[in-house]
Image (cartoon, grey):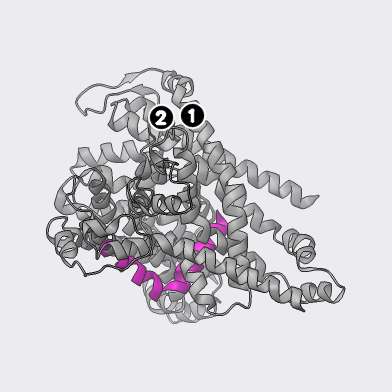
Amino acid sequence: MKKIRIRSIIFVLFAILFAAIFIYPIYFTVVSSFKNNNEIWNTMFSLPSKIEWSNYTSAIQDVKILKAVLNSFIFSLGASFVVVIVVTMAAYVCARNILKVSKFLKTYYLLGMMVPPYAMLIPVVTMFTRLGFRDKYWPMILLYAAINFPMSFYLISSYIEGISQDLDEVALLDGCDLFTLIFRIIFPIARPGIFTGAIITFLAVYNELIFANTLLTNQAMKTISVRLLGLQGERFTSYGPMFASIVLSVVPILIVYLIFQDRVEGGIAEGAVKG
Amino acid sequence: MFGVMSKRKKFEALLVSLPAFLLYSFVFIYPMITVFRLAFFKWNGIPSSPMQYVGFRNFIAVFNDRKFMIALRNVGIFILSGVFLIMPVALFLATVIQSKIRVKRFFRTSYFMPQVISRTAIALMWYFLLYPEGGPLATLFQSIGLGHIDVNFLGSQKYAIYAITVINAWTYAGFNMLIFSAGLTSIPNEILEAAEVDGASGFKRFRYITVPMLKSSFQIFILNAVVGSITTFEMVYVTTGGGPGSASEVFGTLLYKNAFTYNNYGYSNAMGAFLIVASFVASILLRKMFAYSDRK
């Protein structure tokens, strides 16, 4: 029995050690965001002797990080909204094999899961430049919806496939049209699957960098990833505002994650399994 | 039921599918096809300047590029780090969140958290962690008598790529934990209990029951690790940008730089085409291999 106890103590110690490894960089960032420049360095764990709120005022006024957070939210919400409407309709038709081409469409949509979106960077940038779409909200939202289309289609259509067709039949016999059927009857039942697709899209868009970095050049349009990337090159007299900017841009998405934790983890795991 | 559906219903179905089809075709598939077409043209990216047909010359330039070989080696390092670093860690983390440990939710959350943080924010965090003058790692090294080691690994020709694989492991361990955790839940408890009754030690149970039963989780992991390594880009771009020099270059950074630094769009499109084909071929080959080994 003693041997088992020692073994389980070692197990727990390692579990804690790994938790520390994953949390420490975040801890260091948060603590440093409240310190003045002298206190940040040569310490590993110490708390600030005096809380330096000026880092946060500087992050908001000079870095304008909240504007970037707002932009990230607009793109994320927009893309999730488009995904919910457009993908749900398409997923329903494919999941129920209504059209002769349903099978083909399914393969066609899932094809995108195997393609790294940034491989299409140059044609997309060229297209956006030619059509005057740069630095505009809607084109960017549609682009993000398209990039996240395959994954959310997979999540939503496999959920709808698991729903019994009994209700569909009753509704159709009652003379319900397809649009009403999808949004009045299927949507409420499939809400968990649809919501998972939406939240996965939301997370991916909030943190997206490559397309945002090449297509958004106007300072007022930049998202958090682009804004934080810009900070790497800028010279600061103090590092505090940089840490505060990281905290202000990461906290909103961590809150979203913590609220919808099971959906986020479930959706990501399901997507990973499909690969 | 849908077999007897009226023409009107079919028309409605068509109508309802249309927005998705148009969006995906125009914004995803059309650019993808364009990549393959433009890969055969030389172009400097200026809209008014003409494109010149050059046959396979862009592809030849990509494969003859000295940096292509560096990228290939680095992708190999990424794959190896997946197998030897991320896999054991993720497997351990999965056993933790499947064990009877207390405050399980705390462990689960802390392991997974990096996954939802912007890669740029992660790069900044690690830039400060590895800050040579007084950063936390430098301080730690100082206190254990390793002060002579330069902790600026990201700025070192020799170590940059390894530093990135560590940051990468930190970011993606939680994601891979979920893959193994899903596999672990599918192992029936009775089997493990029966083995315990038969006197199999913890390690033996793990080696002879858990690992074989996790076969499909390992397959999913390998598939993600290989395809993810071939297409890796963001993490390298935000930490070193492929530098110092070209030490940590990967396919993605080469694509990006050739377009936006060297105005060599033909090269970039050829690289894009290569990336699409390579990730396709890799995932199909691996699936075939797995299917073959499952049948045996």
Cα–Cα gap, marks 1 and 2:
8 Å
Dot 1, how many residues are within 10 Å of its Cα: few (below 14), some (14-19), or many (20+)?
some
For image coordinates 31% across by 41% down, the residue present is: A124
B236 left or right, relative to A213: right
User: Circle 2 — which element?
Assistant: loop
User: Camera-side residue: A171 or B89?
Assistant: B89
Q: Is residue A269 magenta?
A: yes
Q: Is residue A218 magenta?
A: no
Residue A154 x, y percent position in the rendering: 49, 60
Residue A231 x, y percent position in the rendering: 23, 48
Answer with mark 1 or mark 2, whichever residue precedes in sequence.
1
Tags 1 and 2 touching, CB below 8 Å: yes
Magenta residues, dominant SS class: helix
User: Camera-side residue: B8 or A188?
Assistant: A188
A23 left or right, relative to A66: right
Quadrant hosting residue A165: bottom right
For image coordinates 16% across by 58% down, the residue present is: A64
User: Circle 1 — which element?
Assistant: helix
Whether residue A93 appears in this view of the structure is no
For image coordinates 74% across by 46% down, the residue present is: B292
Q: Give the residue number, with chain letter if any, for mark 2.
A: B246
Residue B125 x, y percent position in the rendering: 35, 54
**Disc 1 chain ID:** B
Q: Give the residue number, with chain letter if any, for mark 1.
A: B70
Q: Magenta residues, as a range? A: A248-275
Dot 2, how many residues are within 10 Å of its Cα: few (below 14), some (14-19), or many (20+)?
some
**Disc 2 chain ID:** B
Whether residue A37 appears in this view of the structure is yes
A244 left or right, relative to A1: left
User: Camera-side residue: B66 or A130?
Assistant: B66
